[in-house]
Image (tube, rainbow, N blue to C red):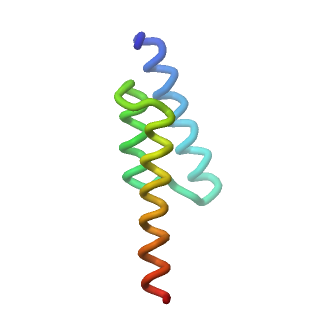
Amino acid sequence: MTVAAKYRRDQAVKLADALNAIEGVPASDYARTLSACWARGELTGEQMKKALLASHRKLAEQEHRRHA
């Protein structure tokens, strides 16, 4: 991955985090970690999405069990 591509990805992550924070939905630490890995080219977008969805499913299951 080129330096320019890494820079664009880093800027995209910063913008997404800022927009989410403005909307009152700040990114979790895990989401920020995944985003940083994606920006460095360590994960594909698909890998990042799958990991984040798996994490959200796990949290939802825990909440469901807690309130069941």
Residue depicted at x 38% and y 51%: 30
Q: Residue furthest right?
A: 23
Front-most of residues 17 and 48 = 48
Left or right of 19 on screen, residue 54 = left
Front-most of residues 23 and 36 = 36
Which picture quadrant has residue 34?
top left
Quadrant including the N terminus: top left
Residue depicted at x 49% and y 79%: 64
Vertical arrangement, residue 25 with respect to residue 39, above or below: below
Residue depicted at x 50% and y 43%: 49
Percent coordinates x, y for residue 33 in the rendering: 36, 44
Percent coordinates x, y for residue 12 in the rendering: 54, 31
Front-most of residues 66 and 21 = 66
Residue depicted at x 36% and y 34%: 37
Percent coordinates x, y for residue 62 in the rendering: 42, 75
Q: How many marks?
A: 0
Left or right of 24 on screen, residue 13 = left
Vertical arrangement, residue 8 with respect to residue 38, above or below: above
Front-most of residues 55 and 7 = 55
